[in-house]
Image (spheres, grey):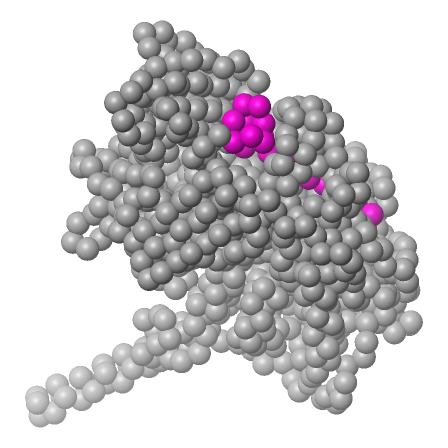
Amino acid sequence: MLTFVAPAEAAGADRIETEVAIVVSSGSHSVTRIGEPVRIGVPLPEGLCFTEAACRLRDPYGKPVPLQAHGLDQWRDGSIRWLLIDFHASVRNASSAEYRLTFGGGPMPPAPAAPLRVTQDHCSIAVDTGAAHFQITRGGGFPFNDAALTAVDGEGELASAVVSSARVVDHGQLRCSVIVEGAIGGTKGEPLVQVEAELQFVAASPTVKVDLTVRNPRKAEHPGGYWDLGSRGSVFLKDLSVTFALPGSALADIQCWPEIDMRVQSAAPFELYQDSSGGANWRSSNHVNRDRVVPNRFNGYQLTTGSMIRTGMRATPLVAVSKGARTIAVTMPEFWQNFPKALEASDNAIVLRLFPKQCAGVHEIQGGEQKTHTFFVALGRDFVTTVPLDWCRAPMRVSIPASWSAKSQAVPYLSTASETAPARRALVNAALDGEHSFARKREIIDEYGWRNFGELYADHEAVFTKQGQPPLVSHYNNQYDAIAGFGTQYLQTGDPRWLQAMHELARHVVDIDIYHCDRDKAAYNHGLFWHTFHYVDADTSTHRSYPRASNVGGGGPAAEQNYTTGLMLHYFLTGDRRSRDAAVGLARFVIAMDDGRRTVFKWLARGHTGLATASGSIEYHGPGRSAGNSLNALIDAHRLTGEAEFLAKAEEIIRRCIHPADDIAARELLDAERKWFYTVFLQALGKYLDYKIELRALDDTYAYARESLLHYARWMAVHEYPYLDKPEILEYPNETWAAQDLRKSEVFLFAARHAMPVDRGRFLERAAFFHDYSLQTLGRMPTATLTRPLVLMLRLGGMHDYFSRVPHLRAPEPVGRAADFGTPRQFVPQKITALKRAKRLAGVCAAMAVAAVTWVLL
């Protein structure tokens, strides 16, 4: 959980380092790279750097290199907390290189040999990188003038995209980004799909990175709360392609590299089509269409060059076409992972098929669903690698020393892997290496394809599958914020594989798991879908939670599984605006779903719906999972935007759900099956208190929240026990309960920060007890490496490692604390009030009708 801890409280914070190593390596694809563009977010300690102009970068030989730096987040004193840097790095073969980022000024960094130049007017944007020229024109080709994006709908109608708007969102001397928007086809003023592209240009490079998003903004029809494929609101595409034309009648020189590390082939024409994953389970029911048919026709890819046809398993193709002095090259990383895909080249053009016509059937994009396709195009010879654009297929890996990240406390309570409890580290490592890793779990249900890649397989839901049955298909989405878990592990270890896993899941969640719609009810629009319903196959519900199955009630996006912190951290580490916008959008979802003015009940009752805080029941609005996740999302959005409405709503939720004088026994929190999640809210309350300290707002609400946390922690210290001590009251007494005990440990640690000595020692003892119990119990369970407990391990337990080194942290006292917080008041949701009034009105109307009839008869 990202909260604030003043660096002065951190262990060893009396000395601030002024230099950090940025290590780049070629990874598994060990080719020499000269001047490859690199981007990474670097955490900085408070007070170190107040302006990007003070940042300098040196190469492994101590030579200054051009640097573009941008602050993404600030500490309370105005210094930079997260710094996004861009530079060009070089490594040779399988080696790595260490660059040194320093602060405090000195000689100005050198300018790039060919700085980016951007010019724009009311209808166009021109970008000159020094190696190529790109033109984006309103009404022109999409996403730029040398390209054409076309679609063929399910009825065979062809339509082209045109640019409707474009804007420069980031312009530095090394890199700039342009957002391009448009639409394709459609009838009656409704486009077939919306399209948006972020174009990233790099100085002295002919190559542009394209993140092209295809979105269906229609409302999904979900009768009964079921969100199946084939429902009204879906869009069907037979083909969606980007074409890069080469004018002239001369024959072209076409070269292709089908796979990474595969030798070049000369071909004319060339077509590579990836029909399925190339994995052993390529026919998995994970890929069923609306007719419950798996449309994949063969395993892997088929390559056609002239009259020759050959096959392979997993392609990451690259094609370069030269005609005279002009060369165009195209590649798409994660090509096979996002099947189906096709790449074609002829004497006249290169065609990248994002939803290829070669696929059997059509491609369905559900209402409110989108997909972002990432590819690279070079309008000229790219010299970073010997094979042009080879570096784009497997970009360099970047790592930051874990000791620096922990020292910075930009992610508070962070410790290095070497400071982590060994038992927890062993469990966490299983997520990355070995037979239980998330990468290996993907293969079980073939968690690949454009809708699935990046997702985690929820293998814990398949524990009741009988031997000989097909694997249960179940998707984890972002439950318990695995994105944040991956990012935290990257910072704790410096291992870039964690960052890659974070990026894959974040991209999937932003595209597939969020409902990109403005036309449904406020309780659903722009919300996050849950994981697949427990112990039930996803079937045609894909990642939308509720399959049509017995004992499965319907529903939709909701507050109980609304996770934002990992998306915020992904933005800080990568600069990806989509993750930032998603995190802020999910906080707006909280406000919208709770707004009674957006419901049909507004005519009968004012007030809030309670959907942002109801956990388990619409009538329960005490400490719970919905309220905790809503509070957490609002704090994140306030940090990202500074907009007052988010903090105001957060404090409204706190006063609604908890009180320093609550009758805790009456809440029946020891009923674990129905109320275990109260600890989620108390964790978020601890985060709120840390955030208020950061804001230096030690006001009445800070005091109210502080006393509420301490009130519940005192009760917990007397009454709480490990869940598995009473297995008879649990429906499924399994490994997840042992992992959830870590939440209790973190609640006690938050409380210890605010407690007087009489309570602090007890809280620290209880925190240590639940931490150690959880790890010891999990260590004895063969199911501890299932996805759900592993994700909990990624997210929980880190506070214990930090407090083990700094046990006497003390939070500041409130300023002018209110003497009396009053008495608790029960929140009544708008719907309940409205129904009571409707019933009374019905009674009055009936009485009036009887009176009227009686008068007539008399």
Picture layout, residue 760 above or below residue 795: below
What residue is drawn where x is 17% and y is 49%?
187
Residue 153 locus on image (x, y percent) = 23, 37
362 with respect to 732 (left or right)? left
Quadrant placement of the C terminus: bottom left
Q: Nearer the viewer, residue 820 or 240?
A: 240
Reply yes or no: does residue 766 show up in magenta: no
- Quarter of the rendering containing residue 667: bottom right
Residue 374 can be seen in this image: no
Q: Residue at x 28, y 48 (%)?
A: 140
| Front position in the image: 761 or 500 | 500
The residue range painted magenta reads 382-403
Question: Is residue 619 left or right of 276 when viewed as pictured?
Answer: right
Q: Residue 527: image x %, image y %?
A: 45, 56
Residue 383 lies within the magenta run: yes
Q: At 91% across and 72% down in the image, what residue appears? A: 758
Quarter of the image where one finds residue 545: top left
Question: In the rendered view, would you say 691 is above or below 561?
Answer: below
Q: Nearer the viewer, residue 54 or 411?
A: 54
Answer left or right for 286 relative to 772. left
